[in-house]
Image (cartoon, rainbow, N blue to C red):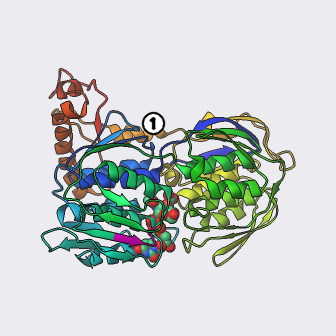
Amino acid sequence: MDKFRIRGGKSLHGTIAISGAKNSALPAMAAALLTAEPVTLRNMPMVRDIVTMGRLLAFMSATVSTKEIPATDYVIEAKSLNEAVAPYELVKTMRASILTLGPAIARSGVAHVSLPGGCAIGARPVDLHLAALENMGADITTEHGYIQARVSNGGRLRGAHIVFDKITVTGTENILMAATLADGETILENAAREPEITDLVHLLRKMGADISGDGTATLRIRGVQQLHGAEHSVIPDRIEAGTFLVAGAITCGDLTIDNCAPEHLGSVLEKLKQAGVMIESPSPTSLRVRGARKLIAADLTTEEYPGFPTDMQAQYMALATQADGVSTVTETIFENRFLHASEMMRMGAHITIDGRHAVVRGPAKLSGTIVQASDLRASAGLVLAGLVASGETIIDRVYHIDRGYERRIPLLVERGPARGSRALGGSGGDSILRWAFSRRRNQAKIAARDQSDGHLRVPILADVPSLRQRSRGMLRATALQARRADARIGIPSAAEVLGPGAGSRSRPRSDLFCI
Ligand code: EPU
């Protein structure tokens, strides 16, 4: 199993370009199910959740193609949706699979999506998604762990007035997508306002949807008969940018963060500045962070956008362990999102938890040890704590971090001691970070192909033999479809893909992969 080994105690200097937002890319991929025409998505992050979503869409009969793996551009074409099924084996690895529910039922009048269940950060029900779809005329039952949704009214949802009891990001996205093909107008109140939702609205508009109110809590969607293909570049990942801002601040480094959207980071920038971090914006798409020698404690409450994001809470907690004074961190979005705190305490942090509040007393001398990552953002928090800990920190279960971060910290260089590293007994070793660079290994797993009968194949769902068989069959068909569509979507022809020895065991010459 992959682990990260971090030797803490040096400051980080350099420039890093931020990738596309995972939480924009996932709904954008699901939105491609709304049309039979190809949707081209650019600036996609090279992270595991994107590959998982690609597999899920392929399972649902869409063609998902890309010229290389890992890829930043994808073409998704859902000519038909024979199987509007999102199986448990895929949904359990990524809750965002629920995003296929809205588009699938809107497009084909029927959907079978596994219930995602709880996860490390909370129970995370989907009751609000289901109630809204019922409001739009869907008959929904949940049996054997699956959501079975069907529309009797000629297979078409009808517009409705929906008021969410609670703000939900994927709930808003699901209903937004479903409403684009509904009969009549849908008004969605108490909608989430995250930039990822506005980005989805921009894509849907390019596909022909009629939506107004983006960026506000009330969205108005007038359903259209059908949507068409489009090209879209997803917005930069504000959480990745925020994580690197904390990396620069906590190590007392000097980082320039390029290709980001500072306007999406308002509450994060404000909180970091309050904690004494120096941040400037040298251009409209970049930020420069310089750590202050002394960080100051500041309380934090997570909130829906434009408030401070829950997805930055673990990273902020790592920073708070190094700040002078008492910081109270209040988590209001998820009921169980402090698992990283106990691991930070094992590293020497002074934290007490009382329900939704964590009281952090700093500055603490952290020392490296073996810690367990429990979810994506908790892992990021532990990496940041490892950067300022003395000695070596081993982070176990890093597959969590691969879900949402590209492994690019090794591109940064260490220079000089980090904040208080001498006092902390910093290792002063040759390299602070030996962040396992095993993306290649993951790529190999994804990209392995069997050319024996001239078909591209991708091994998926290795642990589930029956599903694997079925999925492989579909992927073969998918690969063939992709090749048939070559001319139209401008990817190499089948002959180029397979080389002159197509049908033999010769190695392919092309860089086309289908997932
Ligand atoms: N909730 C309900 N019922 C519902 C839906 C949500 O009670 O039907 C509750 C949840 O249990 C939670 C709160 O409402 O307490 C907010 O949940 P929300 O639905 O907004 O979360 P989500 O859509 O499942 C997305 C992101 C998360 C991010 C949250 C909050 C994606 C794919 N996921 O999740 O991202 O933490 O919004 O901003 O967009 C991550 O990237 O690490 C991550 C977890």
Q: Is residue 508 magenta?
A: no
Residue 44, x across and y down, in percent: 42, 43
Q: Which residue is drawn at 62% across and 50% down?
A: 243
| Residue extent of the magenta highlight | 187-191
Residue 245, x across and y down, in percent: 66, 47
Label 1: how many residues lie within 10 Å, few (<14), some (14-19) or many (20+)? few
Residue 18, x across and y down, in percent: 55, 41
Quarter in which the C terminus is drawn: top left
Q: Main secondary structure of the magenta part?
A: strand
**Label 1's element?**
helix
Q: Is residue 238 above or below residue 118?
A: above
Q: Which amino acid does label 1 sit on?
A: Arg
Q: Which of 469 and 509 is in front in this view?
A: 509
Please say whether residue 480 is visible from this viewpoint: yes
Q: In this view, does 241 lie above or below 90?
A: above
Q: Residue at x 28, y 68 (%)?
A: 185
Residue 284: image quadrant is top right
Q: Name the residue under label 1.
A: 440
Number of marks: 1
Q: Is residue 189 magenta?
A: yes
| Left or right side of 190 for 86 | left
Check mark 1 vs ligand 1: CB closer than 8 Å? yes or no: no
| Left or right side of 476 for 325 | right
Q: Residue at x 21, y 50 (%)?
A: 78
**Furthest residue to the left?**
154
Please say whether residue 125 is visible from this viewpoint: no
Q: Is residue 503 above or below residue 12?
A: above
